[in-house]
Amino acid sequence: MAILVSLLVLLFASLELTSTLIAHENIIDSAPGTAVYFLVEHTGSGISSIIWKFNTSTVIVEALGGSTIYYGAYKDRAKLFTNNATLRLDRVTHEDSGVYEVQVTDDNGSASSAKITLQIYTQMSNVTVVISPVSDGLVEDEDNVTLKCEAQGTSPTFSWSHAGKPLAENPRFILSTDHSSLVIKPVKRSDSNSFICKATNAVSSEHSTPVKLHIYYGPDSPHTNVSTAMCDSNYPGDYCVKEGAEVTLLCQAQCFPDCNYTWWHNGKPDSSKPVHLIQNAYFNNTGNYTCLVKNAYAKKWNYSNISIFIYRPPLGQIACNAEVREDQVNLSCIWAGGIPQTTIELKVGSTSLNGLNEQYYTIAKTDSNLPIDLQCIGQYAMSTQTCRLTLDKPKLSAPTGNKITAGLNADVRLLLLQMKRARRFSATELLPTTFTWSKADTPTIVSGNKFSITSNNTFSQLIIMRFQKADEGTYTCLARNSIGQKAFQFEVYSGNGAVNVGLIAGATVGTSAGVTIFLVAAFYIRKKKRESLNDDALKLNQSHKSQSEDVPPDACRDVKILDGSTSEDGAQVVYAQVKILKKKEKTAVDPADPYAKVDKSTKHRNTGVPDVVYSQVKISKKAENEGNN
């Protein structure tokens, strides 16, 4: 055991006596003019001597026995740190590049050494990019270009960036082995962004100024825009322009430098600008237009074609016409004056005729043919219109009664009027209606002291002024058109009994589709003893102004209280109200009012005319009792 311990002691003692020398860096890169430290670390017993050499043979410094000696040119540039054998070398130059070796001997006489390589690099400067071939511009997809990076400095390495980003891999980008040259084959318009070369060595890096390539490209296929609507597929031309209108043709193409534009019209140059304005378009402006775009630098051109059609709309609206001559009816559809000509289709029953601008058809006027339903359909470049005409002689369509009881001294109005139904096609009134009023004792009633007649082609009204018992009887209105005629009758009587709300009768007259004649009779038929009129009667007079717009201006709009008009028994006349309900409107009836009545007639399913409601002025119980006495 004692022997083992002795061996271990000798082993550790020998390890402590062994000295080593370690260099912190085996290679040092530095730039001229700087100070370089050759850092080493010595382990073991104390240092007795140090010696530094350059490239094996040249002694830089030597330390022995407490004295340090510098040799040659190193006297002013070298500094030895004897505590750890580190050397500092000031103001290095390219000539200082080489291998430096240090040898250290410790107090036990053990020697150790280390070597360090110093490389002096010149910093990068004057980095430039040379373009070849030299050219003002390069044509896209045709030309190639080489970018050569040159720089001053020691051992440079090169890298490239494009548009502010590292150069991406691209089969068109070909780099040399050292990356100093970049070949672009072929150039594209995207290469117009800046290229930058970066030169780098161990001690510095430097960029070139951005290099911008001028790439001539285009024209691409021109894009055209026209300030008008596209034509219908049934008509020639891409775009349709109304005669006299202004139209702008715009042509645009991607191009560098800016291209030259020429608009050609039917094979002849028409404008040398990308925007071509046609003012007051006329028919000679119809035709093919070509936008020709040229790039004088790239020696390329491109074009785009469009066609324009100038049209004139037909005059007015499409017309459905009928001319009645004895035993025949001449029908026609007319919509002329347009360019191109309007296509017309005339339909009567199962018969269909087609042509341009106008079509005619004759049909016998017999009762078996009535009603005659004519439909016209017209088409031209930008529009389609239709009209319809139904021809028939007057006839009742929805009668609900014809006996009226009127109060004495009332002004009784008998009204015959037309009301139009809204349709999707135009309805032209072509067969005017004439009205003739008569009574058994008066073959033809004319306006005078007793009667007032107002008529036109659409309505007729008869007012019996201050109605008396002598005025009782049957009143007839004969409605006549060129197809036929029909008589409408009113039986008007006086009486003090229950109020007869009156007659509501409808008659379809053969003038045009969707027109109905209504007979409205026996308005103001309730009597009241002389006394101040109540508020209800006054309100009635005011509310009557909100009538349907389809009623003629002077018909059913002057319902009022006749102040001072009295009967023999001193009664005063109170009028009733007429109201034409709009679509979907409901009539509210007070069930507690024994005098409020609503007519039960319904809307005719063909004419679609609104219901007419008669509502009576509410009379106080006192007045009612007096009226029954």
Image (cartoon, helix red, strand yellow):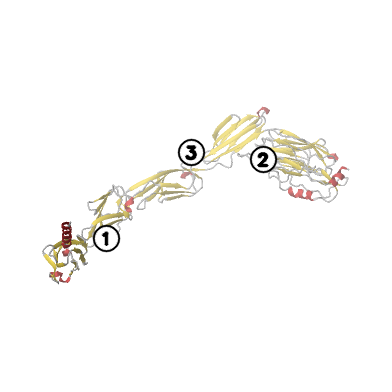
Alpha-carbon distance for marks 2 and 3?
Answer: 36 Å
Which residue position is annotated with label 2?
420
Res. 206 mark: 1
Q: Secondary structure at mark 1?
A: strand
| Up-down relation of residue 39 to residue 572 (above or below) | below
What's the amino acid at mark 3? Ser
> Which picture quadrant has residue 629?
top right
Between marks 1 and 2, how big is the CA–CA gap? 91 Å
Q: Is residue 43 left or right of residue 238?
A: left
Q: Nearer the viewer, residue 239 or 623?
A: 623
Residue 398 seen by the camera: yes
Residue where numbered disc 3 is placed: 233
Label 2 element class:
strand
Q: Does dot 3 land on a helix, a strand or a loop?
A: loop
Q: Residue, x 19% and y 61% (percent of image)?
A: 22
Asked whether 500 or 98 is in front, the reply is 98
Please name whichever residue, 33 or 454, is drawn nearer the observer in this view of the structure: 33
Three-letter amino acid code at disc 1? Glu
Give residue 567's position: percent from left, percent from top. Answer: 86, 45
Residue under the point 46% across and 42% down? 238
Residue 239 position, x and y percent, is 47, 43
| Amino acid type at mark 2 | Lys
Q: Position of residue 126 (x, y in %)?
A: 24, 61
- Quick one: label 3 or label 1, which is nearer the N terminus? 1
